[in-house]
C-alpha cells in the first residue's frame, strides 16, 4: 500500500538492471495506480526486450483482459504458450480461459481451462470454473469430479 516507496524501489531496480522483469514490475505498478497508458507502454517494453518469452506475454495478456481487450489478450496468451521454455504455460492457459469467460465464450473458456489443468492439475481457479461450466451443461458427474479435485487442493481455512 505504500505506493511512493514501491515506485522508488522499482525505479531504482530499473536503473540498476533494465530487464524485462523490471519493466514488467513497473508496468504492473502503473496498472495498479490507474495509469493504463504507462502500464501498456511498460508491458510492451518488457516484451520488446524478450519477445519470445512467455512470462511478459502472459502478463501483457492478463493486462489486456483486465482492460477489456479480449481478442488482443487471447493473442498474447497464445504467444506465451508457444514459448516451449515457459514453465508457467498452465497459467497462460488459465488466464486465457478466465478471460474467455468474460467475453463470454464458454466453449473456448472450457478448452483453455482444460489445457491449464492438463499442464498443472492443481490450479484451483481452473478446477472451480470447470466445475461450474460442467454443472451448467448438466454434467453433474464431471462437475463433482472437478469440485472434488478443487476441494482437495484448496487450502483449509
Image: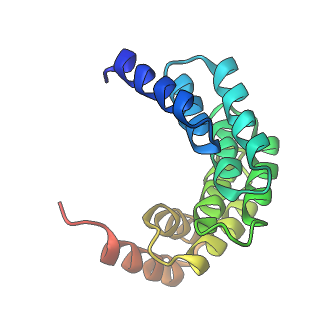
Split into 4 quadrants, where in the image is the N terminus?
Answer: top left
Q: Is residue 38 above or below residue 72?
A: above
Report the residue that reaches farthest toward the left: 157
Toward the viewer: 35 or 53? Answer: 53
Question: By what rule are the colours in the image chosen?
Answer: rainbow
Split into 4 quadrants, where in the image is the C terminus?
Answer: bottom left
Q: Is residue 56 above or below residue 90?
A: above
Name the image quarter holding residue 37: top right
* Labels in figure, total: 0
Q: Residue at x 55, y 27 (%)?
A: 15
Q: Is residue 155 above or below residue 104?
A: below
Name the image quarter holding residue 118: bottom right
Toward the viewer: 77 or 5? Answer: 5
Q: Residue at x 25, y 66 (%)?
A: 155
Report the residue that reaches farthest toward the front: 16
Residue 2: give x, y in percent of width and height: 31, 20
> Horizontal placement of 99 versus 52: left or right?
left
Q: Is residue 118 above or below residue 135?
A: below
Residue 48: give x, y in percent of width and height: 79, 41
Residue 38: give x, y in percent of width and height: 66, 20
Q: Residue at x 31, y 78 (%)?
A: 152
Toward the viewer: 103 or 157? Answer: 157
> Horizontal placement of 78 versus 136: left or right?
right
Q: Residue at x 56, y 26 (%)?
A: 31
Residue 71: give x, y in percent of width and height: 82, 44
Amino acid at each position: 500500500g505504500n505506493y511512493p516507496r514501491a515506485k522508488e524501489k522499482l525505479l531504482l531496480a530499473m536503473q540498476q538492471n533494465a530487464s524485462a522483469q523490471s519493466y514488467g514490475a513497473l508496468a504492473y505498478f502503473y496498472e495498479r495506480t490507474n495509469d493504463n497508458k504507462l502500464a501498456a507502454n511498460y508491458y510492451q517494453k518488457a516484451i520488446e526486450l524478450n519477445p519470445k518469452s512467455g512470462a511478459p506475454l502472459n502478463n501483457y495478456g492478463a493486462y489486456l483482459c483486465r482492460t477489456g481487450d479480449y481478442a488482443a489478450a487471447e493473442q498474447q496468451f497464445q504467444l506465451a504458450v508457444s514459448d516451449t521454455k515457459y514453465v508457467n504455460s498452465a497459467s497462460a492457459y488459465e488466464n486465457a480461459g478466465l478471460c474467455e469467460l468474460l467475453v463470454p465464450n464458454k466453449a473456448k473458456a472450457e478448452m483453455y481451462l482444460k489445457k491449464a489443468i492438463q499442464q498443472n492439475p492443481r490450479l484451483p481457479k481452473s478446477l472451480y470454473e470447470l466445475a461450474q461450466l460442467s454443472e451448467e451443461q448438466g454434467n453433474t458427474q464431471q462437475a463433482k469430479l472437478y469440485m472434488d479435485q478443487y476441494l482437495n487442493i484448496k487450502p483449509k481455512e
